[in-house]
Structures are given as C-alpha cells and as structure tokens.
Image (spheres, grey):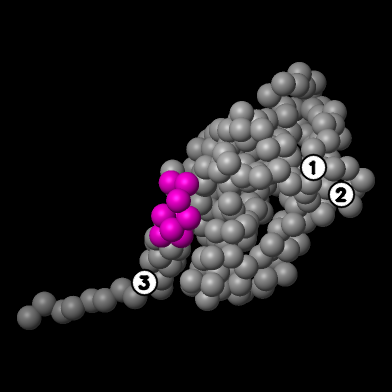
Amino acid sequence: MSGIGIAGAHRSGKSTLARAVSLAKGIDYLDANVSSVITGLGYTPKQELPFEERLKVQNAILESLRFKYAMMGDKPFITDRTPFDVLGYTFSEVSRTTLDDAGRKAFGAHIALALDITREYLTGVMLVRPLLNAPEQETSAQACPIYMQHVYICVREMVEALSPEVFGRTLVGSSDSMAHDDRVRDMTQLMDAVDEINAPRIAQWTPKP
C-alpha cells in the first residue's frame, strides 16, 4: 500500500477521518492544505474566478498534490485530498462555461494530469458525503448545503466516470454513512482490500502422485 485518499466536497470531514484512520492503522497522515495553494496565488477559497483563471488554480493544486505525494516516498500514507476532488471542483465550474477549442484542450489536459497523479501515487480512494451541519470556515468554500451537494455530485461523477481509467492501479470505493465510526470502518475495509490486491502472489505447483 502507498497512498490512500479521501475524496468529497468541502466540509465532508475528510481531514478528521484521515487523521483518525492514520492513528488506527499506524500510517502517516498527509495534510494536503489546498487552501494555502489558493491563497499563495493571491486568491481566496470563496472567490469566484473566470474559468481560465480557475483552471490555472486547479492545475497548481494538482501539481502541489503531486509534489506532496512524491515527498512521502515509499511510506504508506493517508491524505485528505485527491485529484478526484480537484476534478470535481473544476467540473462544477466548467459545467456553466462554454469552452472554445483551446479551452476544451486545456480541460482535457487537466483531466489527464489528475489521472496520471492518481495512478502514480494512490492505491485507494474513498468517496464520502458532505456533512451538511458543518460550520463555516474562512479557509473553505461556502458552507451552503446546496452548493456542497452540487460539488459532491461533481466529485462523484468524476470518480464514476474516470475510475475505470485507474482501476487496477487505484481501488475506488464509497461510504454513504455520515457517522464517523462507520466511515473509519469503511476506510479500513478499503485499505484491507488494497493490501489484499497488492499482496505478492506465489505460484505453487503440486506434482500429481
């Protein structure tokens, strides 16, 4: 096992879940800290941007994830952000935008980059639903239940549409429960499945009597 990621909209409890599972399984927790990438570019998480600018921000987030994943080396880790999250937010923006040929090409390259990073560094991704009673935070997007659900649907669509592209390298699952203990259980089961799939296979031959 190398990287395991938790995917979903903001205020889904991804960071809390990742920390809990890292303690339960004794693996490193990687805080993706996406908000620092956004603010480092001079924007805020709540700010609306023209799609061309938004795509630049999203690509910067993907490159940040690639760097942080790579820094973990061969150590198993769990993280609170995945390229599927980034694609979900990008898709939520592009769905209300008319793209020209250059825009479609740039969006396609964005998807390809996200898939490459997922295949290279993540062996498992768990999709979780948003917690609709989550408090407002300055470092996250709006705590609007409708918007959070919209983003979740976009992330889910990206997972469902693109997981065949990474299946065999990255095992994708989902947890419909909003209860913390259930989510820890589901994450643990996903990680056990990843370990089983990646376990070395030794061919055995028994001669006939």
Please tell me in which quadrant of the rendered image residue 198 appears: bottom left
Q: Residue at x 66, y 65 (%)?
A: 30
In terms of sequence position, does the residue under pointer 2 or pointer 1 come before the other?
Answer: 2
What kind of residue is marked 2? Thr
Q: Which mark is residue 80?
A: none
Q: Which residue is mark 2?
A: 39
Q: Are marks 2 and 1 in contact (CB under 8 Å)?
A: yes
Kindly check if marks 2 and 3 are in contact, taking CB atoms under 8 A apart as contact: no
Mark 1: which amino acid? Answer: Pro
Label 3 sits on residue: 201
Q: Position of residue 7 (x, y in %)?
A: 58, 48
Q: Position of residue 154 (x, y in %)?
A: 60, 33
Q: Position of residue 134 (x, y in %)?
A: 61, 44
| Disc 1: which residue | 45
Residue segment shown in magenta: 177-185
Circle 2 crowding by C-alpha within 10 Å: few under 14, some 14–19, many from 20: few
Give amino acid for label 3. Answer: Arg
Residue farthest to the left, as pictured = 209
